[in-house]
Amino acid sequence: MAHRKGLYEHFVKRPQDFCCALVATACLSPVLVLTALLVRVKLGSPVLFAQDRPGRDGKVFKLYKFRTMTDARDAEGNLLPDEQRMTPFGKKLRSTSLDELPELFNILKGDMAVVGPRPLLVKYLPLYNERQARRHEVRPGLTGLAQVHGRNAVSWEDKFEWDVRYVDGLSFLGDWGIIFDTVRTVFKREGITSATSETMEEFRGSSETAPVEVIMHE
């Protein structure tokens, strides 16, 4: 069933997201500046990592994060695996979620929401099955149901199921419950890595259901 917006999503969620991101940016500005300086010293330039990610309805936007990896390459010029490029400093940034702070600017721009399915890679768009593709019926979020139910420590299928549950149950109380759960998860540093990777292994499509074509909007 296609997602239908309720009153909260129509009239409250976007202004609420903007106000929350604005207040957070102002309050955390010293942390943003200090983190940027540390990234510059520890990892060099550029300080920010920018990458195309699909948003609502598959519309692509630039997502911003603080760098957590080096640009180390092999003899043929290919980037080394994440595990070899991740520094102890980068691990600390990820474990505390400080690397995600520049996404506040994505929220201010309207590319993202505070709560919603996490924006993944553009190359995953054609790999989703029909149900999984429904995660793009709402704006992607800084945090979401999947992030408070295992983060990178659960399977892709489970993460996408949490995403679709969020889309179907989107509500004011649900969003604030996820925000409070996210604070707890960050402080406990849960689910930062998967069982096989420093971050999350690559999604190669669901083995349970054949993927369907997803149209990517420019």
Image (tube, grey):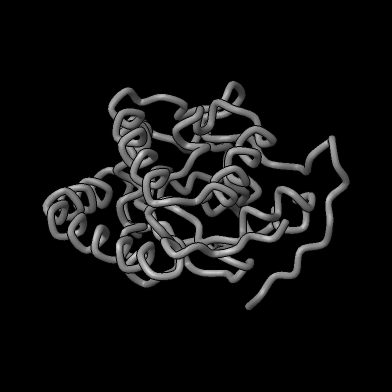
x 70%, y 42%: residue: 203
Which x, y percent locates residue 122? 64, 60
**Is 34 in front, or is 29?**
29
Res. 89 visible in picture: no
Assign the C terminus to one quadrant of the image.
bottom right
Give the x, y percent position of residue 216: 70, 70
Q: Residue furthest front?
A: 7
Q: Quadrant of the N terminus?
A: bottom right
Say how many tags the image has.
Answer: 0
Which residue ends up furthest to the bottom in the rendered image? 218
Q: Residue at x 69, y 35 (%)?
A: 157
Work out whether 53 lies above or below 171.
below
Res 126 quadrant in image = bottom right
Q: Where's residue 173, x and y in %?
A: 37, 45
Q: Which one is nearer the viewer's eye here, 5 or 146?
A: 5
Residue pictured at 24% horizontal, 64% vertical: 19
The residue under the point 13% across, 54% down is 27
Name the foreground residue: 190 vs 39.
190
Residue 195, visible in the rendered structure: yes
The answer to whether residue 84 is above or below residue 215 is above
Task: Compare residues 139 and 218 and report the one nearer the observer.
Answer: 139
Relative side of 85 to 126, left or right: left
> Residue 159: percent from the left, percent from the top?
60, 37
Which residue of the protein is positioned furthest toward the right in this rendering?
A: 210
